[in-house]
Amino acid sequence: MSSPGLTDSRFTRSLVCKSDAAISPGTSSHSLMDFPVPNPSSAASTSASALRLQEQLLTSYMNLDASYSQSKHFLTQAELKQVFTEAADHPVTSLEKLRKYDPKGFIGFCFGRATAVTLLVRRMSLKSSSIAKLFIIGDLKSGNDPELRFHVTTLVKCEGEKWYAIDPMMTPPLAKGGPLPIEEWIRIVKTRWDRDDKAVLYVTEEWIIVPDITADDEGTTGKHIIELGFNPSTQDGFRKIKTGNYTLHWVERPAELEYFLGILSPGHPSRFELLGIVIPSLAKIGIDPNVSYNNYFVDLLNSFTRPQPIEAK
């Protein structure tokens, strides 16, 4: 990435070749509009119907991404602002709609907003290699009590070989609203949630959705990226890069597959499920480990596959 101070030459070319069969787009042309709306209480289940819907959603996502051109190497400042506004006002990803999909305030859906931004910039024909994800993982809190274990934003290449974070959460009073230079996004997030300066920053490819949160986040093995004791400097697949005064860890493909969940072919152990997720460690604190996304991604993908409304003149 050639933003001032961010030094990793591979950011100026394709992040990783997409010929890997594990993430090849599917071939089905199934329309999301034909999908039944699942019962949220069973959305994270392993029933045959839920599994079929998971496969259909995944295939639809891959086909949607594959249908977009890869012709643009960067977006203009005006286009970045347009994407931010679209994501911030989107009927699914708007913060005003969060309670609908996250009534208990348990999920947050930063990864859903980042997914929407990724699809929006791909719809603008931005190359996949000009998109990335930036994660901050740690004991994130604005007070004394834990609030978050991770937060994520989408990084987009802009004119002048500069990279910006498009995070719809960055609105007043947290920020002015709009795309932010990477260093500014990091400064705001760390000031708000990482006052002890212990959280770790990771850069991944755009198809990554979340760190592997199926592992015990309170575990002490040091083997899982969601654990506070995880040290990327002692693991294979992580390389330090700099942006301004901040150190980030560039995640290589093998480490992405080991420590994160993403848009991967059906059956892949590291794929992200678009209906919900099972987090076994929740049972230890009396919470149902079957976490439903309450049709968040069904509605999000439908918003991209439905015909655009025709405005009256």
Image: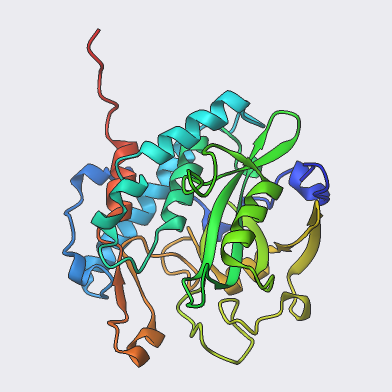
The x and y percentages for residue 227 are 58, 82
Check the image and report above or below for 292 versus 96. Answer: below
- From the viewer's side, name the closer residue of 13 and 300: 300
The x and y percentages for residue 119 are 46, 41
What residue is at 47 percent from the left and 45 percent from the top?
168
What residue is at 59 percent from the left and 69 percent from the top?
137
Check the image and report above or below for 289 versus 219. Answer: above
Q: Is there any visible trace of residue 151 in the rendered image?
A: yes
Q: Is there any visible trace of residue 124 in the rendered image?
A: no
- From the viewer's side, name the closer residue of 282 and 8: 282
Indicate the quadrant where residue 12 lies: top right
The x and y percentages for residue 121 are 52, 36
What residue is at 42 percent from the left and 34 percent from the top?
86
Indicate the quadrant where residue 238 lies: bottom right
- Marks counted in the figure total 0
What residue is at 73 percent from the left and 70 percent from the top?
237
- From the viewer's side, name the closer residue of 137 and 187: 187
Q: Quadrant of the C terminus?
A: top left
The x and y percentages for residue 57 are 33, 54
